[in-house]
Image: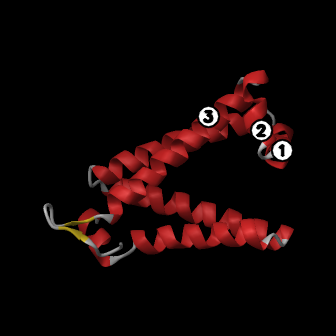
């Protein structure tokens, strides 16, 4: 995927794929942030899927919702910027995935939850690997 070239445009297909994941992350962060800032019964089913996360977010108060809305904006902006071939978007994406991977690594160390923490580290590492491939760097940097 990293150096696969879209024959029609001569550009790596990696950038649109990563942009889609950033857009999906933005949607998830947006919905989660809104549910924390404006709690109500409509969100109960969603939070039943990950009760420990809700409890952790609830301890932080409304700040967690504001942080998630900021994350949603950053992920959406990075996804769009990557599609537009903007250098700043590449840096934002790298920082977002690095922070995500570091958070998963800390979670892995503290919780010893190999499935969640280990998978998160691998996924964030894969995105960082693909973002730093020569074809992607030539396209964006």
Give coordinates of residue 69: x percent, y percent.
Answer: 59, 36
Q: Earlier in the sequence, mark 2 or mark 3?
A: 3
Tell me whether circle 1 and circle 3 mark residues in contact (CB < 8 Å).
no
Name the residue located 46 percent from the left edge and 75 percent from the top edge: 129
Q: CA distance from mark 1 to mark 3?
A: 16 Å
In the rendered image, the residue lying farthest to the left is: 8
Image location (x, y in percent) of residue 113? 81, 69
Mark 3 lies on a secondary structure that is helix
Q: Report whether residue 46 is seen.
A: yes
Front residue of 118/94: it is: 118
Is 102 rendered above or below residue 30?
A: below
Alpha carbon of mark 2 to alpha carbon of mark 3: how far? 11 Å
10 Å crowding of disc 3: few (<14), some (14-19), many (20+): some
At 46% across and 46% down in the image, what residue appears? 23
Q: Residues within 10 Å of mark 1 (few under 14, many from 20)?
A: few
Q: N-terminal of the two: label 1 or label 3?
A: 3
Q: Quadrant of residue 123?
A: bottom right
Name the residue beneath numbered marker 1: 51
**Which one is nearer the viewer's eye here, 94 or 14?**
14
Between 22 and 132, which is closer to the camera in this rendering? 22
Q: Quadrant of the C terminus?
A: bottom left
On screen, residue 118 versus residue 26, left or right, reads right
Q: Given contact means CB atoms under 8 Å apart, are the residues at marks 1 and 2 in contact?
A: yes
Q: Is residue 46 above or below residue 19?
A: above
Q: Which mark is residue 47?
A: 2
Residue to which mark 3 is pinned: 31
**Mark 2 vs 3: CB contact within 8 A:** no
Gap between marks 1 and 2, in whole Å?
A: 6 Å
Q: Quadrant of the N terminus?
A: bottom left
């Amino acid at each position: 995927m990293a150096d696969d070239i879209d024959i029609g445009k001569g550009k790596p297909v990696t950038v649109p794929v990563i942009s889609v994941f950033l857009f999906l992350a933005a949607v998830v962060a947006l919905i989660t942030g809104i549910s924390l800032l404006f709690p109500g019964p409509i969100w109960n089913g969603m939070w039943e899927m990950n009760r420990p996360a809700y409890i952790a977010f609830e301890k932080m108060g409304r700040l967690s919702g504001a942080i998630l809305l900021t994350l949603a904006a950053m992920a959406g902006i990075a996804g769009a910027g990557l599609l537009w071939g903007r250098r700043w978007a590449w840096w934002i994406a790298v920082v977002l995935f690095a922070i995500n991977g570091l958070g998963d690594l800390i979670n892995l160390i503290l919780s010893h939850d190999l499935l969640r923490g280990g998978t998160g580290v691998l996924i964030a590492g894969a995105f960082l690997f693909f973002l730093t491939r020569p074809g992607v760097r030539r396209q964006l940097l």
